[in-house]
Amino acid sequence: MSLSQIISRIHATEKTANRPLGATQLIAVSKVQPNARVHDVLEQGHSLFGENKVQEAQGKWPDFKAEFPNVHVHLIGPLQSNKVKPAIALFDAIHTVDRPKLATKLATEIQAQGKSPELFIQVNTGAEPQKAGILPNDADLFIKDCLALDLPITGLMVIPPVNEEPSLHFALLKKIADRNGLKNLSMGMSADFERAIALGATHIRVGSAIFGDRISHK
Ligand SMILES: *Cc1c(COP(=O)(O)O)cnc(C)c1O
């Protein structure tokens, strides 16, 4: 599917869901995609991208940003504590703040660099043992602790369990955000972004629907 087709679907859903036109930001997830494909989407004027690994992003975005200065790149994958420094230097937002140790490290490094990406807290709404994210029951306290560290937390992020109806998880994420006064919701991917928009997503993360399958184009 082309970028413009995805954008049309976003606008159509905003309309039927009674959300303001443009309420949803499309993050084009460019991980593992060949640079030529990413360049093509950049040339079409798209300016918001997502990557899930610090090192992979370091390998391509400094050059792309030199050519397309208005581009923003968000980290949507797990962040190890030892990568916090380059992550703050490179990314415009980090969606995966998920544990106290990482929060403390981010606070220290934001002070040191005098700049900060916008931050989202990842919530493990399905309480899956293998998945990153703070557990729903611990979320309120963790959000308060992050705000007490002066971290610029603006929203929450979720990756729902693969075999469950994602809408239940989107609704839970919105509920936690609302009761904590957070306005941004990073939720919805290629297969379910319309349901996420209907439930209040402000940022959808769409990869394969824009760029094609990640495996067959390596
Ligand atoms: C890869 C990835 C996406 C995009 O997935 P698609 O199904 O290709 O749209 C979204 N969010 C995260 C966290 C990802 O790692």
Image (spheres, grey):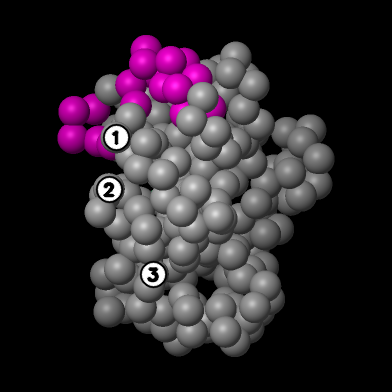
**Picture coordinates of residue 143, whole percent (x, y):** 48, 24
* Farthest residue, direction front: 112
| Residue at horizontal 33 percent and vertical 30 percent from the top | 100
Residue 205: x and y in percent read 50, 52
Label 2, label 1: how far apart the Cα atoms are: 8 Å
Span of residues in magenta:
128-147
- Could you say where residue 68 lies in the image, as x and y percent from the top left? 62, 81
| N-term-proximal mark, 2 vs 3 | 3
Q: Residue at x 33, y 39 (%)?
A: 102
Q: In whole angstroms, how far apart are the C-alphas of marks 3 and 1?
A: 23 Å
Task: Quickly name the residue at label 3.
Answer: 57
- Pointer 3: residues within 10 angstroms few (<14), some, or many (20+)? many
Which element type, helix, strand or loop, lies under badge 2?
helix
Name the kind of residue labelled 3 in the image.
Answer: Ala
Counting residues from the N terminus, which is met first, the one under dot 3 or under dot 1?
3
Displayed quadrant of residue 128: top left
Give the answer, above or below, for where 200 lies relative to 140. below
Circle 1: is it few (<14), some (14-19), or many (20+) Cα within 10 Å? few
- Residue 8 in view: yes
Label 2 vs label 3, nearer the camera? 2
Mark 2 residue type: Ser
Kind of residue at disc 1? Lys
Mark number, residue 101: 1
Give the camera-side residue of 120 and 11: 120
The N terminus: image quadrant = bottom right
Q: Main secondary structure of the magenta part?
A: helix
Q: Nearer the viewer, residue 148 or 79?
A: 148
Q: Dots 2 and 1: beta carbons under 8 Å? A: yes
- Residue 136 in the figure: left or right of residue 129: right
